Image: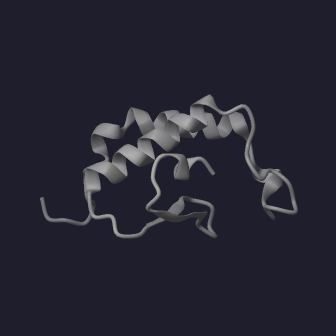
Amino acid sequence: ENIRNHSDKVVDISPMGCQTGFYVSFINHDDYEDVLNIIEATIKDVLNATEVPACNEVQCGWAASHSLEGAKEIAQTFLDKKAEWHDIYGEAQ
């Protein structure tokens, strides 16, 4: 919900149906470093959050699966691996 505070080029961020990640859509944005900075700022928002946005069955059919503590743990794990964000898997090395 907070990602748009960091960029007006964000069209949408949505969870994958399998609940293993998110789709992030930008419009007219091709600066990979800036995209990573936006993602980093948004992940830091998670670490500072006091509640999970839209954590109710009206706004999210998976509300029972939400956990602020779990989200913060995962967010910290992502930030701890920031040095790997440029790695592209599947490319010959």
Residue 91 in the image: state x and y as whole percent.
19, 65
> Residue 19's spot in the image, x, y percent?
63, 61
Residue 80 vs residue 58: left or right?
left
The residue positioned 34% from the left and 39% from the top of the image is 82
Q: Residue at x 40, y 32 (%)?
A: 80
Q: Nearer the viewer, residue 76 or 49?
A: 49
Give the residue at x 63% y 70%. Answer: 17
Q: Quadrant of the C terminus?
A: bottom left
Q: Where residue 58 sits in the image (x, y, percent)?
A: 87, 63
Q: 22 above or below 83?
A: below
Image x and y of residue 28, in percent: 35, 69
What colouring does the structure picture have? one colour
Question: What residue is rendered at 57% in x and 59% in y?
Answer: 20
Between 93 and 45, which is closer to the camera in this rendering? 45
Q: Is residue 41 above or below residue 59?
A: above
* Quarter holding residue 92: bottom left
- The residue lying furthest to the front in this view is 8
Q: Quadrant of residue 78?
A: top left
Q: How many marks?
A: 0
Q: Is residue 17 left or right of residue 63?
A: left
Q: State whether residue 58 is above or below residue 4.
A: below
